[in-house]
Image (cartoon, grey):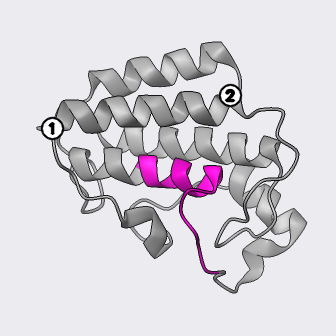
Amino acid sequence: MFDSQTRLEFRRRILQLTPEAQRQWGIMTSHRMVCHLGDQLRIALGDLSTSPIPGPLRYPLIKQLAIDVLPWPKGRVKGPREAFVTQPTVWDSDVATLCELLETFASRHSQRTWPRHPFFGRMSGSLWSRLTCRHFNHHLKQFGC
Protein backbone atom coordinates (compact mmCIF):
# COMPACT_ATOMS: atom_id res chain seq x y z
CA MET A 1 0.00 0.00 0.00
CA PHE A 2 3.00 2.29 0.10
CA ASP A 3 3.24 2.12 -3.72
CA SER A 4 1.16 4.86 -5.37
CA GLN A 5 0.05 2.66 -8.30
CA THR A 6 -1.10 -0.05 -5.91
CA ARG A 7 -3.13 2.49 -3.93
CA LEU A 8 -4.59 3.93 -7.12
CA GLU A 9 -5.79 0.47 -8.15
CA PHE A 10 -7.32 -0.18 -4.73
CA ARG A 11 -8.97 3.25 -4.79
CA ARG A 12 -10.45 2.43 -8.22
CA ARG A 13 -11.87 -0.82 -6.84
CA ILE A 14 -13.24 0.92 -3.74
CA LEU A 15 -15.00 3.51 -5.89
CA GLN A 16 -16.62 0.69 -7.92
CA LEU A 17 -18.44 -0.50 -4.81
CA THR A 18 -22.04 0.41 -4.21
CA PRO A 19 -24.11 0.15 -1.04
CA GLU A 20 -26.21 -2.47 -2.87
CA ALA A 21 -23.25 -4.72 -3.77
CA GLN A 22 -23.97 -8.33 -2.85
CA ARG A 23 -21.46 -10.29 -0.82
CA GLN A 24 -20.17 -13.60 -2.12
CA TRP A 25 -19.45 -14.90 1.39
CA GLY A 26 -19.68 -13.80 5.02
CA ILE A 27 -22.28 -11.60 6.68
CA MET A 28 -21.07 -7.99 6.24
CA THR A 29 -22.78 -5.55 3.94
CA SER A 30 -20.62 -3.54 1.57
CA HIS A 31 -21.17 -0.46 3.73
CA ARG A 32 -20.10 -2.32 6.87
CA MET A 33 -17.05 -3.62 5.02
CA VAL A 34 -15.99 -0.08 4.04
CA CYS A 35 -16.09 0.91 7.73
CA HIS A 36 -14.27 -2.29 8.70
CA LEU A 37 -11.40 -1.52 6.30
CA GLY A 38 -11.26 1.99 7.74
CA ASP A 39 -11.02 0.57 11.26
CA GLN A 40 -8.13 -1.69 10.18
CA LEU A 41 -6.30 1.41 8.96
CA ARG A 42 -7.09 3.22 12.22
CA ILE A 43 -5.50 0.31 14.10
CA ALA A 44 -2.42 0.46 11.86
CA LEU A 45 -2.19 4.23 12.38
CA GLY A 46 -2.52 3.88 16.15
CA ASP A 47 -5.84 5.73 16.24
CA LEU A 48 -7.63 2.70 17.74
CA SER A 49 -6.15 0.91 20.72
CA THR A 50 -6.26 -2.87 20.65
CA SER A 51 -5.89 -5.70 23.09
CA PRO A 52 -3.54 -8.59 22.25
CA ILE A 53 -5.24 -11.81 21.17
CA PRO A 54 -3.06 -14.79 22.11
CA GLY A 55 -2.27 -17.38 19.48
CA PRO A 56 0.34 -18.77 17.10
CA LEU A 57 0.12 -15.86 14.62
CA ARG A 58 2.68 -13.93 16.65
CA TYR A 59 5.53 -16.28 15.65
CA PRO A 60 7.48 -14.65 12.80
CA LEU A 61 7.28 -17.56 10.34
CA ILE A 62 3.58 -18.20 10.96
CA LYS A 63 2.89 -14.44 10.77
CA GLN A 64 4.64 -14.21 7.40
CA LEU A 65 2.84 -17.28 6.05
CA ALA A 66 -0.56 -15.92 7.16
CA ILE A 67 0.07 -12.47 5.71
CA ASP A 68 1.85 -13.41 2.47
CA VAL A 69 1.18 -17.01 1.49
CA LEU A 70 -1.72 -18.97 2.93
CA PRO A 71 -5.22 -18.54 1.48
CA TRP A 72 -7.54 -16.56 3.70
CA PRO A 73 -10.71 -18.31 4.89
CA LYS A 74 -13.93 -16.85 3.55
CA GLY A 75 -16.39 -15.96 6.28
CA ARG A 76 -14.98 -18.21 8.98
CA VAL A 77 -12.52 -15.99 10.84
CA LYS A 78 -13.64 -12.89 12.68
CA GLY A 79 -11.20 -10.02 13.01
CA PRO A 80 -10.47 -8.30 16.30
CA ARG A 81 -13.42 -6.46 17.86
CA GLU A 82 -11.61 -3.15 17.42
CA ALA A 83 -11.84 -3.61 13.64
CA PHE A 84 -15.63 -3.34 13.85
CA VAL A 85 -16.21 -0.19 15.91
CA THR A 86 -17.15 2.38 13.24
CA GLN A 87 -20.82 2.21 12.36
CA PRO A 88 -21.89 2.99 8.78
CA THR A 89 -23.47 6.42 8.34
CA VAL A 90 -23.53 8.07 4.89
CA TRP A 91 -22.11 5.92 2.06
CA ASP A 92 -20.23 8.67 0.17
CA SER A 93 -18.78 10.07 3.38
CA ASP A 94 -17.66 6.66 4.65
CA VAL A 95 -16.03 5.82 1.29
CA ALA A 96 -14.26 9.21 1.26
CA THR A 97 -13.03 8.60 4.82
CA LEU A 98 -11.65 5.20 3.81
CA CYS A 99 -9.76 6.76 0.88
CA GLU A 100 -8.39 9.50 3.14
CA LEU A 101 -7.26 6.96 5.74
CA LEU A 102 -5.50 4.99 3.01
CA GLU A 103 -3.55 8.09 1.97
CA THR A 104 -2.70 8.89 5.59
CA PHE A 105 -1.44 5.33 6.04
CA ALA A 106 0.72 5.64 2.90
CA SER A 107 2.15 8.98 4.03
CA ARG A 108 3.72 7.22 7.02
CA HIS A 109 5.75 4.76 4.93
CA SER A 110 9.02 5.86 6.53
CA GLN A 111 7.70 5.60 10.09
CA ARG A 112 9.99 3.36 12.15
CA THR A 113 7.66 2.19 14.92
CA TRP A 114 4.18 0.87 14.19
CA PRO A 115 1.36 -0.19 16.51
CA ARG A 116 1.05 -3.84 17.37
CA HIS A 117 -1.58 -5.88 15.61
CA PRO A 118 -4.02 -7.71 17.92
CA PHE A 119 -3.33 -11.12 16.29
CA PHE A 120 0.15 -10.65 14.80
CA GLY A 121 1.79 -8.58 17.53
CA ARG A 122 4.82 -6.50 16.58
CA MET A 123 4.60 -5.31 12.96
CA SER A 124 6.93 -3.39 10.69
CA GLY A 125 5.62 -0.88 8.17
CA SER A 126 6.30 -3.38 5.41
CA LEU A 127 4.21 -6.05 7.15
CA TRP A 128 1.39 -3.59 7.80
CA SER A 129 1.49 -2.59 4.13
CA ARG A 130 1.35 -6.18 2.88
CA LEU A 131 -1.37 -7.11 5.38
CA THR A 132 -3.41 -4.08 4.32
CA CYS A 133 -3.14 -5.02 0.63
CA ARG A 134 -4.16 -8.57 1.36
CA HIS A 135 -7.02 -7.51 3.65
CA PHE A 136 -8.39 -4.96 1.16
CA ASN A 137 -8.11 -7.44 -1.70
CA HIS A 138 -9.91 -10.12 0.33
CA HIS A 139 -12.89 -7.90 1.12
CA LEU A 140 -13.12 -6.18 -2.26
CA LYS A 141 -13.27 -9.63 -3.88
CA GLN A 142 -15.98 -10.50 -1.36
CA PHE A 143 -18.11 -7.86 -3.10
CA GLY A 144 -17.00 -8.59 -6.65
CA CYS A 145 -14.56 -5.68 -6.99
- Res 69 seen here: no
Q: Tell me the number on the disc at residue 39.
A: none
Residue 49 sits inside the magenta stretch? yes
Mark 1: give few (<14), some (14-19) or many (20+) Cα within 10 Å.
few
Query: Does dot 1 land on a helix, a strand or a loop?
Result: loop
Q: Tell me the number on the disc at residue 107.
A: 2
Q: Main secondary structure of the magenta part?
A: helix
Q: Please report the residue visible at 11 percent of the width from the left and 38 percent of the height from the top.
A: 20
**Span colored in magenta:** 37-51
Q: Position of residue 136 (x, y in %)?
A: 49, 41
Q: Please report the residue visible at 73 percent of the width from the left and 65 percent of the height from the top.
A: 116
Q: Is residue 31 left or right of residue 82?
A: left
Which marked residue is nearer to the observer: mark 1 or mark 2? 2
- Res 67 seen here: yes
- From what the image shows, is residue 99 above or below residue 29? above
Q: Position of residue 88 (x, y in %)?
A: 21, 52
Question: Foreground: 103 or 24?
Answer: 103
The residue singled out by tag 1 in the image is 19
* Quarter of the picture holding the C terminus: top left
Question: Foreground: 13 or 115?
Answer: 115
Q: Please report the residue visible at 63 percent of the width from the left and 57 percent of the height from the top.
A: 46
Q: Please report the residue visible at 50 percent of the width from the left and 72 percent of the height from the top.
A: 80
Question: Foreground: 16 or 37?
Answer: 37
Query: Does dot 2 land on a helix, a strand or a loop?
Result: helix
Query: In whole angstroms, how far apart are the C-alphas of marks 1 and 2?
Result: 28 Å
Which image quarter: residue 74?
bottom left
